[in-house]
């Protein structure tokens, strides 16, 4: 999981400066997933990338994460967060191994990113706040989930 986390951070640090929609849908999916919360890494004024497991912090699992992709550009994500349901995704990638997405607020001071590894069911959901703030004001909340299919629909 640490390897995926490093790839996730590197990829999103590269694409965070993009301003146009980026779509790469190579695989069509109708995913209906149940994702169990495992741990969170928090960086804010109180914690500097401190890890908390499911016994240390109260977080909800995702009972019905819906991801639908259709080539050339249909990409729907439901129940991951309210933000993903209300804003336009800027980065959308779907292939046989991975689903990747990122969105920014209109003022580009808030972003959410997610990466789902289909082979392992690992989901990482990152929320970044105060992007334009001073280095010590930026906040990150990186949640890790383990997902399983609700239906046999891949």
Image: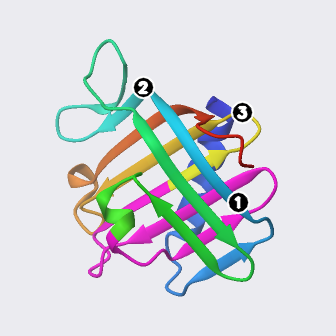
In the rendered view, tell whether residue 130 sits above or below residue 87: above
Q: Nearer the viewer, residue 79 or 106?
A: 79
Check disc 1 and report the residue beneath it: 29
Horizontal side of 135 relative to 104 (left or right) equals left
Q: Nearer the viewer, mark 3 or mark 1?
A: 1
Disc number placed over residue 96 in the picture, else none: none
What residue sits 39% from the left and 32% below the top? 61
Q: Give the residue at mark 3.
A: 120
- Residue 124 picture location, percent across and down: 52, 42
Badge 3: how crowded within 10 Å, few (<14), some, or many (20+)?
A: few
The residue mark sitting in front, 2 or 3, is 3
- Local secondary structure at mark 2: strand
Left or right: 107 as drawn, with respect to 97: left
Residue 98 part of the magenta-drawn span: yes
Residue for badge 2: 39
User: What residue is drawn where x is 55% and y is 63%?
Assistant: 101
Seen from the viewer's position, the closer of residues 87 and 71 is 71
In this rendering, the answer to whether 42 lies above or below 113 is above
**Residue range corresponding to the magenta coloring:** 86-113
Q: CA distance from mark 3 to mark 1?
A: 16 Å
Q: Is residue 30 above or below residue 117?
A: below
Q: Residue furthest top?
A: 55
Q: Distance of mark 1 from mark 2, alpha carbons?
A: 26 Å
Which is in the foreground here, disc 1 or disc 2?
1
Q: Earlier in the sequence, mark 1 or mark 2?
A: 1
Element class at badge 1: strand
Find out whether residue 120 is within the magenta segment: no
Q: Quadrant of residue 131?
A: bottom left
> Percent x, y for residue 117?
69, 43
Real-space Cα separation, disc 2 to disc 3, in angstroms: 16 Å
């Amino acid at each position: 999981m640490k390897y995926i986390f490093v790839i996730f951070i590197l990829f999103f640090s590269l694409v965070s400066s993009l301003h146009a929609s980026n779509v790469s849908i190579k695989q069509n999916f109708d995913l209906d997933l149940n994702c169990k919360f495992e741990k969170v890494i928090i960086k804010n004024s109180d914690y500097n990338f401190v890890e908390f497991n499911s016994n240390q912090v109260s977080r909800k699992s995702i009972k019905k994460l819906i991801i639908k992709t259709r080539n050339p550009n249909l990409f729907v994500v439901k129940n991951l967060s309210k933000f993903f349901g209300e804003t336009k995704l800027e980065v959308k990638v779907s292939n046989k191994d991975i689903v990747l997405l990122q969105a920014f607020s209109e003022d580009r001071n808030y972003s959410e990113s997610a990466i789902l590894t289909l082979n392992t069911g690992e989901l990482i959901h990152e929320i970044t706040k105060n992007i334009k703030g001073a280095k010590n004001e930026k906040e990150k909340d990186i949640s890790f989930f383990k997902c399983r299919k609700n239906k046999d629909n891949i």
